[in-house]
Image (spheres, rainbow, N blue to C red):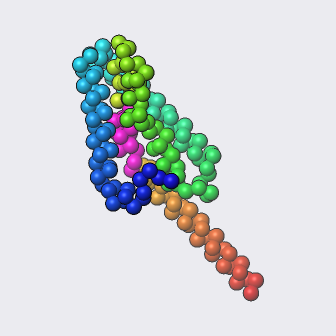
Amino acid sequence: HYFISREVISVYDHSLKVIQEGAMVFIIFATFSQLFLKGTGTTLLDVAVMIAFQLVIMIISMLWVCMLLQILFPLPESEPKFHATGLFLSVSKTMPMGIPLINALYKDHPNLALFTLPLLLWYPLTIVMGILIAPRVSEYVQREENMLRKRQDEKQQAEMMDYHQVL
C-alpha cells in the first residue's frame, strides 16, 4: 500500500517535482553555507585533484558496469535500454540522503567540509558525464534495437518459409 495514492500523485506530479527539486537545492545551499561559514581547509588544487580522481573512478565504474551488463544480460535476451539504464544508475548517488547522513555522523568533526565535498562534487560530475555520453548511449540503443528488429524479422521470415514448405 502506498502512503499517497497514485491518483493524488498523478494530479500533483508537477508540484511534487518542484518541491523535490526545491528541497534538493535547499540541502545543497545549506551544506555550502556551512562549508563557507566554517571554512573548508582545502585549496583549489585539492578540489581539482578530487575532481580528477572522481572522474577516473566514475569512468572505471561505468566501463566495469557496462562490461558486467553485457556479460550477465546478453543482448538477444535483454533490451538495449536496460543496459543504458544500468549504465547511468550505476554511478548515481543520493545527495539528499548522503549529506544529512554525513552531517549526522561527523557533526562536530573539524574536517566535515572535506567529508561532504566529494559528494557535492559527484552529483554535478554525473550530470556533466551524462551530457557527454548520452548521445553515444542513445546511438548504441538505437543501433542495437535495429539489429534486434532485423534478427526478429529474419527469424519470422525463416519460420514463414518453413511453414510454406510444409504445406
Where is the C terminus found, in terms of image quarters? bottom right
Is 154 part of what is drawn in magenta? no
Instruction: Kindly indicate the quadrant of the structure image that contains residue 39.
Output: top left
Most extreme residue toward the right is 166
- Which region of the structure is painted magenta? 122-135
**Residue 128 in the image: x percent, y percent?**
34, 39
**Residue 118 in the image: x percent, y percent?**
38, 26
- Residue at 37% x, 56% y is 9
- Residue at 30% x, 43% y is 21
In front: 90, or 100?
A: 100
**Residue 80 in the image: x percent, y percent?**
52, 54
Is 128 part of what is drawn in magenta? yes
Instruction: Kindly indicate the quadrant of the structure image that contains residue 76.
Output: bottom right
In front: 67, or 103?
A: 103
- Residue at 52% x, 49% y is 83
**Residue 57 in the image: x percent, y percent?**
46, 29
Magenta segment main secondary structure: helix
One can see residue 132 in this view = no
- Residue at 41% x, 53% y is 4
One can see residue 167 in this view = yes
